[in-house]
Image: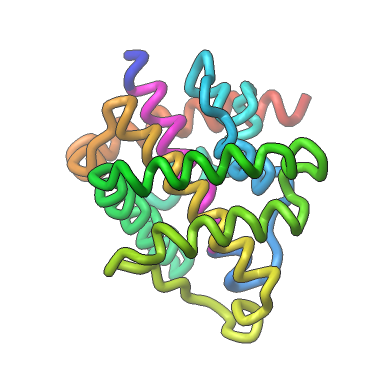
Amino acid sequence: MSRSLHDQTLALAGVFQAADLVQQIANNGHCNETSMETSLRSLFATDPATTLDVYGGELTDLREGLITLSSVLSEQNKQQDIEVLRYVLNLIHLESRLNRHGDMLQVIGSRIDQARHTASHFGYTHANLISNLASIYTDTISTFRLRIQVSGNPSLLQRDENAAKVRALLLAGIRSAVLWRQTGGRRWQLILSRRKVVRYARELADKANTSFDN
């Protein structure tokens, strides 16, 4: 198995994990805390030795993303699958726009760096950090003409803490989309190489499940 497919699948799973967590919050008002921590922590992995290190170094950290990737790309027969896929495609599109705005990339990088102290002091799922990351998303990526419309329960989405989590996770999804592009990921692969990606994501998910069970 080529190293590039390995790295691309991990990074794409990162995008799907963030998108799935957004879908969970929008419809249920909560999400898997461990998976959310993995996604938000990835924003601070600026000098990783490997692609997996961005997400904590263990396949179990990306377990939810790998499972979501393989099920959504192979089925798309549930409303939640369609919503997650829409978020993923929008995140990838926004990342390509962001890549052409070096000044905005610098602002995002600088503000994430400033948030490191909050992350180290309070942890990656603390309300203070989530609010900080949400404001970065609002001040930068939300200014693009294309804005991700999140579907779900309006009463849940109107709660400040849920809205902040959604924006912070969308920022994490953008980070994984950056990584996906850097490892050679391209949008056409989601169509032409879909079966190969799904098959490999399932293999990795099985390994993650084995580690998780142990």
Which percent across, then down, holds residue 58? 64, 23
Residue placed most toward the observer, 138 or 17:
138
Which percent across, then down, holds residue 9? 40, 31
Q: Residue furthest bottom?
A: 155
The colour scheme used here is rainbow
Residue placed most toward the observer, 86 or 173:
173
| Residue 210 visible in the current orientation | yes
Q: Is 93 situated above or below 184?
A: below
Residue 172 in the figure: left or right of residue 144: right
Residue placed most toward the observer, 67 or 106:
106
Task: State the image quarter where residue 148 is shown.
Answer: bottom left
**Most common SS among magenta residues:** helix
Q: Is 20 situated above or below 142?
A: above
- Quarter the C terminus occupies: top right
Q: Is 193 situated above or below 105?
A: above
| Residue 1 visible in the current orientation | no
Tell me where the magenta segment starts and ends, as one range.
5-22
Residue 79 in the figure: left or right of residue 189: right
Residue 81 in the figure: left or right of residue 160: left
- Quarter the N terminus occupies: top left
Whether 123 is among the magenta residues is no
Which percent across, then down, holds residue 42? 57, 36
Which percent across, then down, holds residue 21? 58, 56
**Residue in the picture at 23% in, 35% down:** 193
**Residue in the picture at 63% in, 61% down:** 165
Residue 62 in the figure: left or right of residue 79: right
**Residue in the picture at 51% in, 40% down:** 110
**Residue in the picture at 63% in, 38% down:** 41
